[in-house]
Image (tube, coloured by chain):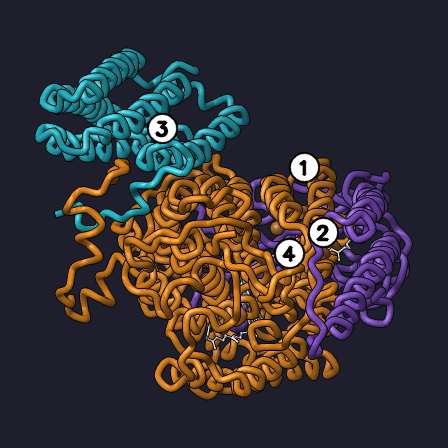
Amino acid sequence: MFNHLVPNAASYSGEVDWLFWLITVIVGVWFIAAEAMFLWLIFRFRARPGVPAQYVTGKEPHLKRWINIPHFLILICDVIIIIAAVRVWVHIKQTLPPPDLIVRVTGEQWSWTFADPGPDGLIDTADDVRTTDELHLMVGKTYHFKLESKDVLHSFFVPAFRLKQDAIPGRTYTGWFKTQQKGTFDILCAEICGLGHGVMGAKLVVEDPPQHAAWLQAHAHDADMAAMNNPPADSTSTPATPAAAGAR
Amino acid sequence: MSQPTTTHDHHGPAAAHGAHHEPNWFLKYFYSTDHKIIAFQYMFTGMALALVGAFMAYVFRMQLAFPGASVPGFGVVSPGQYNALITNHGSIMIFWVAMPVLIAGFGNYLIPLMIGADDMVFPKINRLSYQLFFLSAVVLIASLFVQNGGFGGAWTAYPPLSANKAYNLTPWGASMWVLAVALEFVAFLLGGINFIVTSMNSRTKGMKAFDVPIVIWNIVIASILFMASVGPLIAGAVMLLFDQLLGTSFFNPNRGGDPILWQHLFWFFGHPEVYVVMLPAIGIVAEVITVFSRKKLFAYRTVIYTIIATGVLSFFVWAHHQFVAGIDPRMANVFTVTTVLISIPIAEMLFVYIATLYGGSITFTTPMLWALAFIAEFLIGGVTGIYLGASGLDIYFHDTYFVVAHFHYTFFPIAIIAVFSGVTYWFPKMFGRMMNETWGKIHFWGTIVTFNAIFIPLFYLGAAGEHRRIFDYHSFPSLATPELQAIRIVATVSLLVMLAFQPIFLVNFIGSMFRGKKAGKNPWKANTLEWTADSPPPHGNWPLDQMPEVHRGPYEYSVPGREKDYWPQNEPA
Amino acid sequence: MSSSTKTIATTRSAMGLPTGRLAVWWVLVSEIVIFGGVLVSYIMNRVGHAEWAEEASHTNTWAGAFNTLVLLSSSLSAVLAHKAASQGNGKKAAGLLRLTCVGGLIFLIVKSFEWTHEIREGFTIQAGGFWSYYYTAAGLHAFHVIAGMMVMLWVANTAAKNEDLHRVENVGIYWHFVDLVWIFLFPLLYIAK
Ligand code: HEA
Ligand code: HEA
Ligand code: CUA
Ligand SMILES: [Cu+2]
């Protein structure tokens, strides 16, 4: 749909767009038909002197058709929409293709922190590279992301991937995506999470493996920096670590 | 509780209506048990709060269009204030505008008049209901002015944000918000019992269930939906309040609680709630289009069955608000099926309305214009719901402006368009005078055109990935483009124009109360019973010996072989 | 006097049911979903938290059982009150209603001893998930017991004057409901360990 609006940066973005167009066509036809009929009737049966209204009970078979046939046609359309929607859903949310790499994504008031597996390609090892508000990925790789939250609900939203998932404190959610386009994209937080919700976002950079390696190199010293969290500039009035304050 | 006897003793109803001493104005307008006065109390409170909600929309839309600039009449909007404004805008518009005006306002006014009764069955409970409602409104408004400001966790109030003051930073605002909502629910439970029992039990002689006008059916079914769905959320509100104030751990994940539980309790109510406000609106439209096309409703029983089907289905769709909230993904499939299927009864209902126009003789009075606009606009809101109900697509659209546009295309037709239709239609009955048609039409066109100009752009913004509840998009490069900002400005400017048209309505409304042409009993030549009472109806509605009796259904217009093109329900055959 | 606001609407009965009774049934519908919300939430959580069983073992099953008995017998006197009222014996109905209230009072007294004991032991409402539900569900129920008692005393007063005797039945229906809720709460909070 939104190719010109938002790039198609994950393998399944196109499926979501396709679903959008399918629904647009189906409901669009109905919508236009209904509005056209509606406007025509308004025009055709406007009050004219000497023309009384007809007495129609709605039981006349030739008229009742106009309600009954659409009833079944809509049912058919519904089934098509449901099947298409469930297929896309199952592919994105209910399947987990084997990953090339695993990253950790953690939301907290009000920033995203990420853990990249680092040069060894394994997550939760000493060489993990932790970053705040910036996620670097390699193009053409299948990733699993482990999504967590430290305090309230957040929602990991990557428009270019057509991906969204809420982060829930106390739980870890595992999802997947496969990158397919290089570039810089936005990561947003789509669940209201307090004062700084309006500034909570991060940069997503999808790059070639060599560039990624270079980036890892440059950020090797960032390992274990995740604990440091810099609240956005305009939230100075709040406790530095609301999470800690809340957990007390 | 009251007396179920069938005879009137000497201090019974007769005494109430025969009472000739004029009560003083305070007792008459503020402490009355007359259903019409209570209806006005609800309506006027609702309208006043509509202005508050509209003011909030004005402030935060200005902030969105011109981030950081000082908003005339408010000042600079801080992030905390922005959150509080949208939260309370949503809460007010749904709970303190749509509910009181549509259900309590029209319900109170119309039920006794349309079923030929003198009042509600429990007038005192009715008054208590309004008083509680008023109190809840006071608590809500007060919550905006307490220390640290109003609650800013969205009208859905998801914990842990809403439950823990260390997260939301508004200890007072959050608790008062929950309290206000809970009080409002209790008020509507009391009102609902009255609506249901009155319409079930107090129909006048001869009025069978299928002689009851659609709008009454709808208000009753809406009340039943409300009563059957709000319980868990009342319990949830108590639990949330305890989490906030007593340190319980219902929703606290750090201590074994479950934040998602709240979402289930909220949406188990929240989704039926949207149909709770939709049904009365749809009912109003049914009354108006039949009268002004001089037509029998195309399929009366079908409409009632579709309402019931919608009501029943609405209990099984709630998790479509939670597709990506961390529920079991398999559950999403079930809820996609139920959600998309709800299009069938609603489409059928709308098609019956459209078919009603067939063969009609349509006059374009102000109420009719509003009613027709309702159908045209609501269709947009309805079909965009299907995009969201499709789970695969909702991954992208959830919590974007596409959702915002969807529900304004449903709510605005319901809470504003249908209400304007109902108010302009029953105004002659309520105040005994006609409203000005010319000004009514100017107001109509000014509002409808700008309405579309506000919300169509929001679909586009949503498609571009713009997420909700953001006070300023400058932090997100893909959303901070000049192109998208220009669209935001279009929406805001359209809102300003829409607001500029509203004084026309207010002046017309208040002016016509005193200056309008005298209306007479039945200015629209309608069939239903309220038009057989005086305009405005006195306390008790009809003289005791002239309570109407019913001989036919409510929509017998243009019956062949009759001189008049209407046939009032009470006219003997 | 109250009958000055009594309306014709109140005296009609298009459904063939007395208005008051119809209303009480609808009140119960809304009450059922309120308690349903709490109980379903509790059960879902309880299933997910095996450790709650240990917390639940600190409740006093005997006190709970005794209270169940008290409430059941008070429902019996409510039935008898209805019977007396339908025979037109307002005095007797009033007396039986007051007896029902005494049942409610005993229930509350036992409850308060129980709670004091538990709070002393450190099982406050903040002590954990189970205790949050325990106090909230039972507290909500106790609130209904108190409300029911107040209405009952008021009805007893009018009934003693042989007025509005139909109310005796309506308040009785409500009391049975309060009783029934406890029948659900007792096993869920006390016995399931
Ligand atoms: C009264 C208000 C109202 C009404 C009537 C509706 C009606 C519908 N809504 Fe909407 N909705 C809201 C108010 C309303 N909604 C609100 C307030 C929210 C957001 C809450 C928040 O998060 O703050 C919301 C959010 C919302 C979501 C969650 C979005 C998200 O947050 O991710 C979904 C998802 O399924 C949804 C679906 C639907 C559907 C399927 C209908 C259906 O009832 C629509 C049925 C009607 C039609 C389909 C049109 C007529 C049919 C035809 C013309 C035939 C052709 C159609 C087909 C072939 C299918 N709505
Ligand atoms: C009935 C419901 C209703 C109504 C009518 C409106 C009306 C409007 N809404 Fe609102 N809105 C919500 C319900 C409603 N809204 C909800 C539930 C939310 C979600 C909140 C959340 O996220 O938590 C929301 C959120 C919301 C947002 C998203 C904010 C964000 O996420 O950051 C925006 C943004 O533009 C917006 C704009 C508007 C505008 C411009 C109007 C304009 O149409 C307003 C114009 C007002 C009038 C024209 C009123 C005129 C009244 C009179 C003249 C008096 C007479 C009155 C009667 C006869 C009743 N609304
Ligand atoms: Cu984090 Cu919004
Ligand atoms: Cu919904």
Q: Is residue B425 visible?
A: yes
Instruction: Determine which quarter of the picture holds residue B234.
Output: top left
Name the chain letter of the residue that bears numbered label 3.
C
Give the x, y percent position of residue B561. 65, 60
- Amino acid type for the residue under numbered disc 4: Leu
The image position of residue C155, as x and y in percent, is 17, 32
Residue B297 badge: 4
Residue indicated by mark 1: B328
Tell which subunit mark 2 falls on: A
Label count reads 4
The residue tagged with tag 2: helix, strand or loop? loop
State the CA–CA distance, disc 1 to disc 2. Answer: 45 Å
Q: Nearer the viewer, residue B159 or C145?
A: C145
Instruction: Check disc 2 and report the residue beneath it.
Output: A58
- For the residue pair B444 and B160, the one nearer the viewer reads as B444
The kind of residue on which mark 2 rests is: Gly
Mark 1 Cβ and ligand 1 under 8 Å apart:
no
Asked if the residue under mark 4 is in contact with the one under mark 3, i.e. CB atoms within 8 Å, the reply is no
Q: Residues within 10 Å of mark 4 (few under 14, many from 20)?
A: many
Provide the residue designation for mark 3.
C134
Quick one: which chain is orange? B
**Callout 1: helix, strand or loop?**
loop
Q: Quadrant of residue B197?
A: top left
Which secondary structure, mark 3? Answer: helix
- Location of residue C178 with respect to B16 vertically, above or below: above
C38 vs B359: above or below: above
Residue under disc 3 on the same chain as residue under disc 4: no
Q: Residue at x 25, y 29 (%)?
A: C171
Alpha carbon separation for disc pair 2 and 4: 8 Å
Q: Earlier in the sequence, mark 4 or mark 1?
A: 4
Which-is-in-front pick, marks 1 and 2? Answer: 2
Q: Quadrant of the N terminus of chain B?
A: top left
